Image (spheres, rainbow, N blue to C red):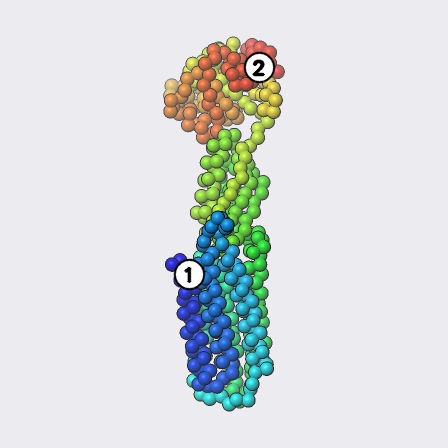
């Protein structure tokens, strides 16, 4: 049995206990207020049974309800809101229009019994509300608030009993104070339940926390939209995010990582849907290790004396510019490959064309982390290598720099 169901079961037991106490001492004392409060508690037993049934039903999924029946909890909360308001009406009616002619008996005993009822009611309401908020169950919270209204009605009855003990009738004054509390609790629950049933947005604090989690991912460029809603105890979140990557597989991996972070850091999230798209670059930049300035492709990456960097427009693959630059790390004894890779990454290179695979060497990890695509070419010169990729140089590559 889940925690929410355990609380609901305890609620049933508490309400049956309160009903029994009120009924027994209403008979002993002849108090009409206690009798009305006992009738009120009979509604509470029914309400607690409804909460328990709602929690059981809400977890089920079927072909007709693939997203679950979580909102049954909120529907139960709606019923409880009306039950609270009706309870307020019953208390007011009994206090204002009830019979005041009957002489009360055993008033001190009735007062002690009513104090015990208030203590039990207060203790359980605090427990239920705290537990409901902890586990994120709206119906458990609603039931706790409902039980708390019982305390206010019991206080009204207690005031009436104390007044009767000293010869005063204070029922009417107490009842109007109690009605204010009852109406406030009932309307709050009613509004909360209606918001969820009508798919109102998730609260600002939760959405802001989700936004912070998404933006903490280094590959996230921007959030186009972020929405969320409650359904029973659970939250459903949807976001449209632009990733600063070009590889769809990498983008999918990042989205799964974000989804896990959201579920780990925010309680009771049932589903996170990330609509992602890689960043759309207007320019694609190729890097090619060269054996000479004439454009011959080098067989060695880190030891290549030159690198050609060639840029094209992604929209129509038209040539923009190219340059041939010396490898600044060719004289380095160790790590020249990784240093050359970092050098090209800092120049915003998108694709590397090489003749031989890195075979697990340092540069492959650097390029992978930076989302730089590594392609193998059999071509001997860079013009042919680029043509294989679907891009064509404009004019000839002569010496150090060339711009089309």
Residue nearest the viewer, comparing 319 with 391: 391
Residue 58 drawn at (x, y percent): 47, 56
Residue 60 x/y as whole percent: 45, 53
Query: Quadrant location of the N terminus?
Result: bottom left
Give whichever of 105, 312 is nearer the camera: 105
Residue 248 drawn above or below residue 151 = above
Which mark is first along the chain, 1 or 2? 1
Q: Is residue 240 left or right of residue 258?
A: right
Q: Position of residue 156 (x, y in %)?
A: 52, 78
Q: At 41% across and 20% down in the image, what residue appears?
A: 357
Residue drawn 42% across the image and 61% down it:
5
Of the 4 image quadrants, the one containing the C terminus is top right
Q: Is residue 280 shown above or below 128?
A: above
Residue at horizontal 44 percent and vertical 74 percent from the top: 18
Residue 393 tag number? 2
Eyeballing the image, is 275 above or below 310?
below
Q: Residues within 10 Å of mark 1 (few under 14, many from 20)?
A: some
Q: Secondary structure at mark 1?
A: helix
Q: Whole-percent x and y of residue 116? A: 42, 77
From mark 2 to mark 1, how far is it between C-alphas?
A: 70 Å
Depth order, front residue of 346/194 = 194
In the image, what residue occupies the spot 56% across and 18% down? 391
Evaluate whether residue 121 shows in this view: yes
Q: Is residue 344 above or below residue 101?
A: above
Q: Which residue matches tag 1? A: 5
Question: Image quarter for residue 124?
Answer: bottom left
Q: Is residue 320 visible?
A: no
Disc 2, SS:
loop
């Amino acid at each position: 049995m889940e925690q929410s169901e355990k609380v609901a079961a305890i609620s049933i037991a508490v309400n049956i206990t309160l009903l029994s106490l009120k009924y027994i001492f209403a008979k002993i004392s002849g108090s009409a207020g206690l009798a009305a409060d006992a009738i009120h508690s009979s509604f509470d037993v029914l309400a607690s049974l409804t909460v328990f049934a709602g929690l059981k039903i809400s977890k089920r999924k079927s072909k007709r309800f693939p997203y679950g029946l979580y909102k049954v909890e909120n529907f139960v909360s709606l019923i409880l809101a009306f039950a609270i308001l009706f309870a307020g009406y019953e208390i007011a009616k009994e206090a204002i229009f009830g019979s005041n002619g009957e002489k009360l008996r055993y008033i001190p005993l009735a007062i002690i019994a009513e104090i015990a009822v208030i203590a039990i009611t207060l203790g359980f309401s605090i427990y239920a509300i705290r537990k409901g908020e902890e586990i994120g169950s709206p119906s458990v919270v609603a039931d706790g608030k409902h039980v708390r209204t019982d305390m206010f009605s019991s206080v009204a009855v207690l005031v009436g009993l104390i007044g009767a003990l000293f010869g005063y009738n204070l029922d009417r004054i107490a009842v109007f104070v109690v009605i204010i509390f009852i109406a406030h609790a009932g309307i709050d629950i009613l509004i909360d339940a209606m918001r969820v049933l009508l798919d109102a947005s998730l609260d600002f604090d939760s959405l802001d926390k989700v936004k912070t989690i998404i933006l903490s991912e280094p590959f996230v460029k921007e959030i186009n939209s972020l929405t969320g809603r409650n359904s029973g105890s659970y939250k459903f979140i949807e976001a449209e995010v632009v990733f600063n990557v070009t590889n769809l597989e990498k983008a999918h991996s990042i989205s799964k990582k974000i989804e896990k972070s959201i579920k780990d850091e925010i309680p009771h999230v049932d589903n996170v849907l990330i609509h992602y798209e890689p960043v759309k670059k207007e320019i694609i930049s190729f890097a090619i290790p060269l054996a000479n300035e004439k454009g011959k492709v080098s067989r060695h990456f880190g030891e290549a004396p030159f690198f050609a960097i060639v840029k094209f427009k992604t929209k129509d693959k038209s040539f923009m510019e190219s340059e041939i630059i010396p490898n600044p790390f060719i004289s380095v004894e160790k790590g020249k490959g990784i240093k050359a890779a970092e050098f090209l990454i800092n120049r915003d290179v998108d694709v590397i064309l090489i003749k031989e695979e890195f075979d697990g060497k340092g540069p492959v990890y650097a390029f992978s982390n930076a989302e730089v695509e590594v392609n193998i070419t059999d071509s001997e010169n860079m013009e042919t290598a680029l043509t294989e990729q679907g891009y064509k140089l404009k004019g000839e590559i002569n010496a150090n720099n060339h711009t089309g």
